[in-house]
Amino acid sequence: MLIAAVAMFDSRAAFSPSAGTALGDVGSRWYPFWAATIMGIAAAIVGYRALTTLQPIEGAFEGRRSVFAVLKIAVPMVAYAALIGGIGFRTTDFTYRIVPAFGFYLATALYMGLFAWWLGRYKIWWVAAIAVAFPIVIFLVFEIGFRVSLPKSFLYTSGLLPF
Amino acid sequence: MEVFGQLAGGFATALQPINVAMLFVAVVLGLVIGVLPGLGGTSGVAILLPITVFIAHGSLPGSDATTAIIFLAGIYWGALFGGVITSILFNIPGEPWAVVLLFDGFPLAKRLGKPGLALASSFLSSFLGALVSTILFTFFALPIALKALEFGPAELFAVFVLSFATLIGLGAEAPMKSLAMLALGLLLAAVGFDTITGEQRLNFGQTSLLSGISFVPVTIGLFGIGEILASAEEQGIGFVENISARLGLRDVFEALRELRKRLRLVLSNAIIGFFFGVLPGHGATAASFLGYGLARQYSKNKENFGKGEISGIMGPQAAADAAGVASLVPMITLGIPGSPTSAVIMAGLFIWGLQPGPVLFIQHPDFVWGLIASIYLGHLLTFILCLLAVPLLAMIMRVPYAIITPFIVVISIIGSYSLNNSMLDVFITVLFGIIGYWLRKMKYPLAPLVVALVLGDSTERELRKALIAGHGSPLYFFNSGLSTVLILLAVVLVAIPLIRTIRARRRGAAPPAVAAHP
């Protein structure tokens, strides 16, 4: 409903008579306004039904175990995506980085290694092998084979690594 | 017959070495994706979609857009077959359309000790269902496309409205949830520049949103990441049954004998599956449940269902594969995806610079007929591979969770980044992955969201073109007989769940649910 309300507010010019460019055209705001209105009404009905009908006591998750199972995947994934480009903030004339850009390959090595060590509980040399082998294979297939340029790390800009 | 000449040309295209090689790679990938419980056919196609850009633009020697579509469709054919292997052998469905095989496929393998027969019956009926559907596709596609060429904006808009109505009226989930998802998809498609006036909208001052929200990162997130999160919750809950995965010639011959007894059922389910699959939004999953229902309804041995009845394997498999193939028919002929997977394939066409719909038959006949010919070849290849490689495919189930899960995330991130070299797309993928997981959890259907996101631009364009032609009058939509009929049909379809709910309330019971669709 919130999404619908924001979109309706942004598209309030739907009611402006000079919206379109041609005779009979409804303008650029008309369509998103009514899509948002339909969404808002449908969401309100779903919300009303959810409030007026009996819901299961245990809620959406089957227990604490299932919440943690999802978080175990979701949190490292968000951290992985953030590490690729680095963490920081931007002002009008400068970008400050708290964590430097690890690039795709270094971040992948850390991410795959973390899973092998944490969830797989493999021995340390297996963890190291997985962390090294996967980025190298991906580099050969995508960067060399398909010529897809993936984000590079801060070590690439200083010439220490090829990725 | 013109069709035979075109099909022969299609075979000449599909049989080019690069196309055969990519079809083989795609089918193997599809089988692997189908076997993996954490990754569905739609996710697999979405994740690998960005790679096809490089294939379509000639990164491989001799490759073009036809190679790209043969590759994407091949993944789907592989996944259609591969999903059943784990259902039958391990009691774990690899794909949503393989859920129905838990009822009779697993009991035949486990209780009656005939895993080879169960697998061979499934593969044979899948192959026959797909073959019937492809033959119907071959003969129906051109007439539908030629008719669609006569459509004006009013008729095209009415077709879009009808496809949205089927998503609401025949969907498995609550119609209001489908409607909300549909409207959200239309809204997301409207972000960025308005294609008619060039005005900016819904970008909230962000220049990065001016080009709109790209379909690919959203789909990779909703399906790829969303499924990974959903399956994370289920890990460790199920106990993996271990059954010998050997499939011998004796099993194939026994399955052939059983198929002969059920030829009528398989053929009729294939034809029904085809017409069901053509309906927008309803892919293989809904057809598989329909096929099971029909097999049980007309069986003389109803009491054997649920205990390893072969009709309970052959009926749904024939319908599911027929519907899977048929879901490409509206995409190719009208530019309307028949299922979420075909919506992803359709997005591929846009990215390669092609316009899905009837003009494809005129402008790129080699592309269309190459695809149709590759469906025949793809299914034959999948069938042979399935017969030969079941033990190998069953071993994929043993790849550790701690490796396969992060690997799928990594491939998803590569897919979303590589299309526009944009980190924003990576964040959109992660965000929509979490949203997709939550929507699944709250039982919101994803199909209307994906279909609306793909069709949003075209729907708005045709609506506004029709309004301009009609000087702003909505009565313009009723000037043509065809658009009037289609709009009335759409109204009836939307009214169906409403009537169902009112009737159920009068009886004091909950409204009956229709089989789930992917």
Image (cartoon, rainbow, N blue to C red):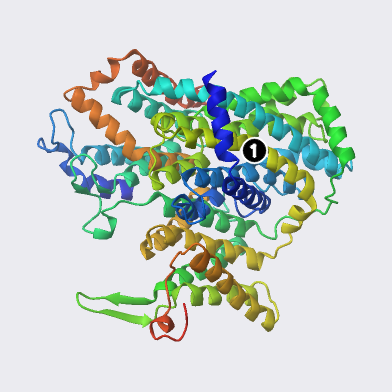
Q: Nearer the viewer, residue A60 or A159?
A: A159
Residue shown at the point (10%, 35%) measured from the top left: A17
Question: Can see residue B304?
Answer: yes
Where residue A98 sits, quadrant-wise, is bottom left
Q: Quadrant of the N terminus of chain B?
A: top right
- How many discs appear? 1
**Residue B46 appears at what percent x and percent y?**
50, 50
In the drawing, does residue B86 fall left or right of residue A87?
A: right
**Residue B299 appears at what percent x and percent y?**
78, 21
Q: Quadrant of the C terminus of chain B?
A: top right
Q: Nearer the viewer, residue A114 or A146?
A: A146
Q: B200 above or below A110? A: above
Question: Can see residue B443?
Answer: no
Q: Residue furthest top?
A: B481
Q: Nearer the viewer, residue A10 or A92?
A: A92
Tell me the SS state at disc 1. Answer: helix
Q: Nearer the viewer, residue B143 or A109?
A: B143
Question: Disc 1 residue type?
Answer: Leu
Residue designated by label 1: B377
**Residue A49 appears at what percent x and percent y?**
44, 39
| Mark 1 belongs to chain | B
Residue shown at the point (74%, 42%) measured from the top left: B384
| Mark 1 surroundings within 10 Å by alpha-carbon count, few (fewer than 14), some (14 through 19), many (20 or more) | some
Q: B305 above or below A127? A: above
